[in-house]
Image (cartoon, rainbow, N blue to C red):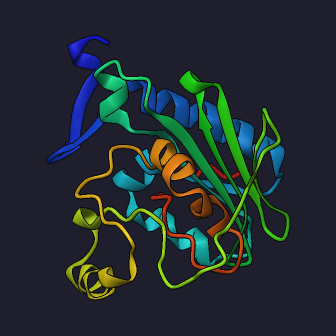
Amino acid sequence: MRAEDVWEKSPGEVVTIADQECEKALSASLCAAVPGSVVIGEEAAAEDPALLRHLSGEQPVWLLDPLDGTGAFASGSQDYGVMAALVVDSETVLAVIHQPEHSRTFVAEHGAGAYETESGERLVVPRSTSSLDGAVMKRFLPADVRAVIEQNEHRFATLVPQATAASIESPHSHEASATSCCTGAPCRGITPPVPSC
């Protein structure tokens, strides 16, 4: 990747031309898949946070991280992915994680569970709910939200200082996290272009 194709959108947050081009292409495809929907992409929302208002509207909304693990991608690592979730009436009804370099795609559907598409292997939620699995990047959250997360850190079985790509780490080390987005638990793992479809 050429040096001019990689830059920081905020301190410590890398973005590439691939993020932007992928977001444009996927936005068009997602809108075609669900006519009347809108897409909130990470890069567009970073430029215009007001796009998040669509989450409280009546239209179905796609949340899209076109290149999760941009730093890994830019450095040549295969550990990056694409994440999308469909929110209808404030409820996540579908979540997809695609790992192109690993040829793996995980899908979670509300009421139908989660699975890996190639093998059809179902992802199983542990019976115990005494601890939580998931990923939260606190550094971009408002101080009051960070404080609530920090007050609840004791509920997590394991804390990793810094995740590099939730799309890579979550399906492997936290099999339940893909399902939790579609079982009634709040799905906040996908950080949100609102092109209207």
Query: What residue is drawn where x is 45% and y is 50%?
Result: 166
Q: Is residue 46 left or right of residue 138?
A: right
Where does the N terminus fall, quadrant-wise?
Answer: top left
Spot occupied by residue 187 in the image (x, y as percentages of width and height)? 57, 70
Viewer-side residue, 47 vs 90: 90
Query: What residue is drawn where x is 48% and y is 75%?
Result: 132
Query: Is 115 rendered above or below residue 102?
Result: below
Q: Residue furthest top?
A: 2
Spot occupied by residue 97 in the image (x, y as percentages of width and height)? 61, 45
Q: Quadrant of the rendered structure where residue 159 is? A: bottom left
Q: Is residue 113 left or right of residue 143?
A: right
Spot occupied by residue 45 in the image (x, y as percentages of width and height)? 43, 55
Query: What residue is drawn where x is 22% and y is 63%?
Result: 139
**Residue 116 can be seen, yes or no:** yes
Query: What residue is drawn where x is 26% and y is 78%?
Result: 146
Query: Is 50 rendered above or below residue 19?
Result: below
Q: Is residue 136 left or right of residue 66?
A: left
Q: Quadrant of the rendered structure where residue 48 is? A: bottom left
